[in-house]
């Protein structure tokens, strides 16, 4: 069953891997363009493993920003991962300490989204499934970074051919995956407006955390849902 769970995770993560591959190659190309060596780019993908903050990091490195500010900026972009880990904690309580350490390292956006959806459907979240889903995305991410770093200069300016829009489109797809949740529209709208305001008045990358916090505050202030439980749940309680 453990082996079956692993390959189920691999199959589930395969489409995500295909969708994420251009981002890995794009990062590799941008990293080299900003003065990284090929080894530096691959090492960053293998250790940081967080697409959006990697993009922020290489742009800051390219502008000779102080190291502490780079670290703080990457933390601001990755603040959402604190929320991700808190949200899925109830599903991974049975993992060992070592398994949790690896699980949270692999906790990128699609990993969180799929774990959350799987847990809501009542499906088991075993470490084998989680690992299979995570590795099929992580390993190709590193390989594609290498490919992008080696051959990225053949592309020229990625922005000139519109590759810079891939990341926003990718995140929009993840957000829309939760569109059936209660109060989705007001929370997303407030979060988006707060993020735009943060970008205008505070600047990047702090607008990411500002938008996330605004959505959390609104969700906490809204009254509980009054939706009736599903028939299956009523029968179970009876």
Image (tube, grey):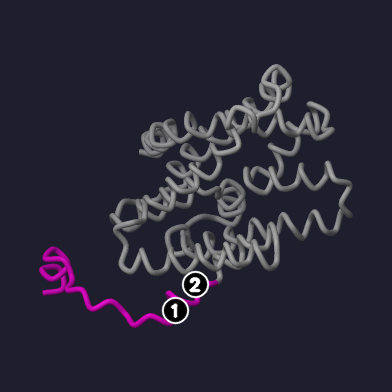
Q: Which mark is residue 69?
A: none
Q: Which mark is residue 220?
A: 1
Q: How many marks?
A: 2
Q: Is residue 42 magenta?
A: no
Q: Quadrant of residue 236?
A: bottom left
Dot 1, how many residues are within 10 Å of its Cα: few (below 14), some (14-19), or many (20+)? Answer: few
What residue do we see at 62% from left, 49% from top?
A: 105
The answer to whether the residue labelled 2 contacts the one labelled 1, judged by CB atoms less than 8 Å apart, is: yes
Position of 133 with respect to 96 (left or right) is left
Q: Nearer the viewer, residue 87 or 149?
A: 149
What residue do we see at 54% from left, 60% from top?
A: 85
User: Which element carries disc 1, helix, strand or loop?
Assistant: helix
User: Which element carries disc 2, helix, strand or loop?
Assistant: helix
What residue do we see at 31% from left, 51% from top?
A: 123
> Where does the image place residue 223, in percent across and percent down from the top left?
34, 82
Q: Which residues are magenta?
A: 214-238
Dot 2, how many residues are within 10 Å of its Cα: few (below 14), some (14-19), or many (20+)? Answer: some
Magenta segment main secondary structure: helix
Q: Nearer the viewer, residue 130 or 181?
A: 181
> Where does the image place residue 174, in percent across and percent down from the top left?
44, 48
Q: Quadrant where the N terminus lies? A: top left
Position of 41 with respect to 227 (left or right) is right
Q: Nearer the viewer, residue 210 or 150?
A: 210
Question: How much space separates mark 2 and mark 1, taking CA atoms?
Answer: 6 Å
> Where does the image place residue 183, in percent across and percent down from the top left?
33, 69
> Where does the image place residue 145, in percent across and percent down from the top left?
67, 29
Q: Quadrant where the C terminus lies? A: bottom left
What residue do we see at 71% from left, 22% from top?
A: 156
Q: Is residue 217 magenta?
A: yes
Q: Mark 2 — residue?
A: 216
Q: Is residue 115 above or below residue 86?
A: above
């Amino acid at each position: 069953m453990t082996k079956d769970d692993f390959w189920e995770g691999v199959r589930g993560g395969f489409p995500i891997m295909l969708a994420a591959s251009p981002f890995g190659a794009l990062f590799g190309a941008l990293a080299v363009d900003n003065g990284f060596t090929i080894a530096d780019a691959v090492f960053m993908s293998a250790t940081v493993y967080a697409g959006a903050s990697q993009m922020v990091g290489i742009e800051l490195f390219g502008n000779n920003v102080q190291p502490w500010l780079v670290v703080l900026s990457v933390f601001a972009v990755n603040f959402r991962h604190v929320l991700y880990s808190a949200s899925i904690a109830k599903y991974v309580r049975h993992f060992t300490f070592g398994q949790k350490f690896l699980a949270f390292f692999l906790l990128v956006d699609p990993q969180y989204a799929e774990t959350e959806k799987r847990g809501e459907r009542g499906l088991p979240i075993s470490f084998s499934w989680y690992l299979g889903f995570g590795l099929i995305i992580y390993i190709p991410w590193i390989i594609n970074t290498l490919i992008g770093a080696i051959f990225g200069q053949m592309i020229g300016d990625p922005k000139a051919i519109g590759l810079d829009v891939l990341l926003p489109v990718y995140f929009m797809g993840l957000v829309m995956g939760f569109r059936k949740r209660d109060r989705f529209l007001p929370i997303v709208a407030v979060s988006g407006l707060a993020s735009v305001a943060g970008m205008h008045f505070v600047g990047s990358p702090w607008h990411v955390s500002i938008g996330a916090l605004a959505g959390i505050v609104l969700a906490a202030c809204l009254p509980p849902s009054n939706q009736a439980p599903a028939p299956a749940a009523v029968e179970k309680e009876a």
